[in-house]
Amino acid sequence: MKILFVGRNCNVGGGCTFRYRASLGLLARGHEVSLAAQGGPMAEKFRAAGVKVHTLLPTPFNRFQLKGLLNKGGFDVVHACNPTAGDDVFVASGKRKPRIGFVQSIHGVLPPSVKSAAGNPSLTESDEILCFDRFARESLQKLPGMENRTIRHVPRPVEKRSETVHPQSPPKLTMVSRLSKSKGKTAVAAIEAIDQLQAEYPGLGLHIVGDGSMRGEVQRLCGLLNAKYGKELCQAPGALVDPFPAMTSASGVIGTAYVALEALFHEIPVIASGYEGYGVVTPENLEFAVDCNFGDSWSGDDKKDLHKEITTELMLEGFRSVLGSVSTPQGRADLVEIRERLEQNHSLDEVAKRLEAVYELAIATKAGRSS
């Protein structure tokens, strides 16, 4: 198949991570993959992997570029990542379904401003629509106008890395996250927890990878902590195109979504901390953790009964649990079990197979429209 991904940009983030890893799996299975998006630091990674990158202007000025690609590219299917990209594809196709298979993916719970499918042609006009976790899919299905649509589920892809995991001593924890107003509070709670744990774990460090509106405040708090103990215990250098090397020397990782999956795929303990918290991921709660995207997508009764607000106490609980169990036989066995279970659904090849099935359905629908 000749596949065109359409995204917002090539910046570091969940949507771009999906497109990159999905591309790796699809390329390995013999497909031709292109990407249309604004530039960004991950563009070169796509090119190095063999993806043909078409650099777009910001929306809505990108639509004439997309029109040319869709008319002349010879693609079998276009996969738009998130509604803005899908709407761009729809308008570029003359405000009608494109002449090739049209797949729309939703990468999380839609914002409250989206009240119905009306006015969102990517939701109503795509041949196939897919989500990556149960709560995002359930939330989308409840949206007025989506009741009768079939929403496919595809697991998030995880790349098996070659780097060796080697926790350092004294131990450190690595947090990988946007430092936005909503998620930056996790970093603040983590810094406070590191401070309170110095007596129990002298020299315990924290490496915060990410950028956003709270980065300055997070760096200020790191500086105060370092000055208090006269050594660099906490650092927040900003976002990294590839944060995984910073995770390999950690005794535990704080994060959600792809960060959590990648750590667990390599037997690194995870304290999942999405928009509303979660806690340490264990074999017992793994299925639910994946369903709610490690704390980012809770909804309904499950949220009422199980969510934990992100607090210093939650971080303390998680840090103590991880540091106390990571080197024990049971702790290691739990991480092996989690990895083996995740590998069944989240490997690049398995996800590529599932995407192929969705693309084939979209292409068949397109063929039916043309006949």
Image: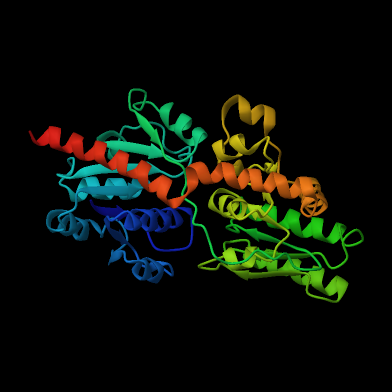
Residue found at x 77% / y 51%: 322
Q: What is the count of numbered marks?
A: 0
Q: Is residue 366 visible?
A: yes
Quadrant housing residue 364: top left
Task: Name the colour scheme.
Answer: rainbow
Q: Residue at x 38, y 58 (%)?
A: 24
> Residue 124, percent across and down?
28, 33
| Image position of 66 (left or right of 131) | left
Tell me if residue 76 comes above or below residue 114 in the rendering. below
Quadrant into which the C terminus falls: top left
For the question of whether residue 314 can be seen, the reply is no
Which residue sits furthest right?
199
Which of the 4 quarters of the picture holds residue 177? bottom right
Residue 160 located left or right of residue 20: right
Report x, y in % for residue 261: 57, 50
Query: In the drawing, does residue 231 fall left or right of residue 163?
Result: right
Between 371 and 193, the residue placed more toward the observer is 371
User: What percent of the width, then of the height, locates residue 258?
Assistant: 53, 52
Residue furthest to the bottom: 230
Instruction: Report the side of 80 relative to 348 (left or right).
Output: left
The residue furthest left is 371
Identify the residue at horizontal 37%, vertical 32% (top origin).
151
Camera-side residue of 365 and 176 = 365
353 vs 318, nearest the viewer: 353
Residue 64: x %, y % from top left: 18, 58
